[in-house]
Image (spheres, rainbow, N blue to C red):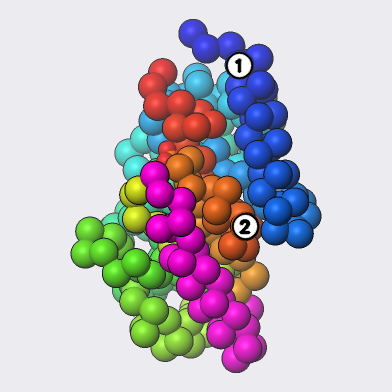
Amino acid sequence: MIEMEHFSKRIAEIRHRVEKACERAGRSPDEVNIVAVTKYVDTEITNQVMNAGCLHIGESRVQQAVPKWKQLGDRGTWHFIGHLQRNKAKDIVGRFEYLHALESLQLAAELDKRCAALSTKIKCFIQVNVSGEKTKFGISPAELNDFAGSMANFSHIELAGLMTMAPNTPDREEVRPVFRELRHLQKELQRQQFAVPHLSMGMSQDFEVAIEEGATFVRLGSILVGTSS
Ligand SMILES: *Cc1c(COP(=O)(O)O)cnc(C)c1O
């Protein structure tokens, strides 16, 4: 059994690295939210992570996320970070405050309908496949303008910002242009008066580069929470 102290120590180490990355970029660490990705661990470990002070919790599978939320969801802010099938939207709405991987208008319509029925809202990041890898979800940068424009049709969806996943490589300089491009896309949208305040980018392997390039939400699993119970 992993001790809470162990998480406190890890969190402190990661916060320190976040601060250093912010310093390099001339940013305030207050701008960076750490989402603890608990998808690899069970409810008890997730509870310990929350007790240690991580209150942004990220899950990526409905089947695991919902039972956890039922036990722990009375506190914290819950982020659904994975690919969400349309028929599962109803399980997330009213529970998860954020969805990080919106990439189809059909899903948006379903979320909007489910939110309306519960008189609630959901904050969504549009997932953009900046790297263009075939294995990655997300809309293409070329589709982004129209997609963001369509969001006006969904009054129960609040646009949180943009999300991307960089190529899975330990080479930090290979991922940097991907993060930089997402920032550029955000600025383009902002120039057109779209409200897209946040950038969800950066995982265990590359969060420092993502912060240097403007991330406001980093999603940390293995490095922060670990990968097994
Ligand atoms: C699993 C996952 C993460 C966390 O990955 P780590 O490399 O373990 O930090 C972040 N974002 C998404 C979308 C994920 O699926």
Q: Residue furthest left?
A: 134
Mark 1 vs mark 2: give the one in front.
2
Instruction: Look at the picture and state if 170 lies above or below 201.
Output: above
x, y (%) of residue 205?
45, 42
Which residue type does callout 1 highlight? His
Q: Which residue lies furthest to the top in this view?
A: 1
x, y (%) of residue 94?
52, 53
Asked whether, in this view, residue 19 is left or right of residue 141, the answer is right
Asked whether, in this view, residue 39 is left or right of residue 31, the answer is left
Q: Which of 157 and 58 is in front in this view?
A: 58
Does 29 appear in magenta?
A: no
Say whether mark 1 is within 8 Å of ligand 1.
no
Q: Is residue 154 in view?
A: yes
x, y (%) of residue 83?
33, 55
In percent of the image, x 49 and y 8: which residue is there? 1
Q: Nearer the viewer, residue 215 or 145?
A: 215
The residue under label 1 is 6
- Badge 1 or badge 2: first in the primary sequence: 1
Q: Nearer the viewer, residue 139 or 43?
A: 139
Sort mark 1 into few (<14), some (14-19) or many (20+) by Cα contacts within 10 Å: some
The tag on residue 131 is none
Ligand 1 falls in quadrant: top left
User: Of helix, strand and loop, which mostly describes the magenta segment?
Assistant: helix
Q: Is mark 1 on a helix, strand or loop?
A: helix
In percent of the image, x 59 and y 62: which residue is there? 213
Q: Is residue 117 in view?
A: no
The residue under label 2 is 212
Does 188 appear in magenta?
A: yes
Which residue type does callout 2 highlight? Glu
Residues in magenta, as a range: 170-195
- Which quarter of the figure is the C terminus placed in? top left
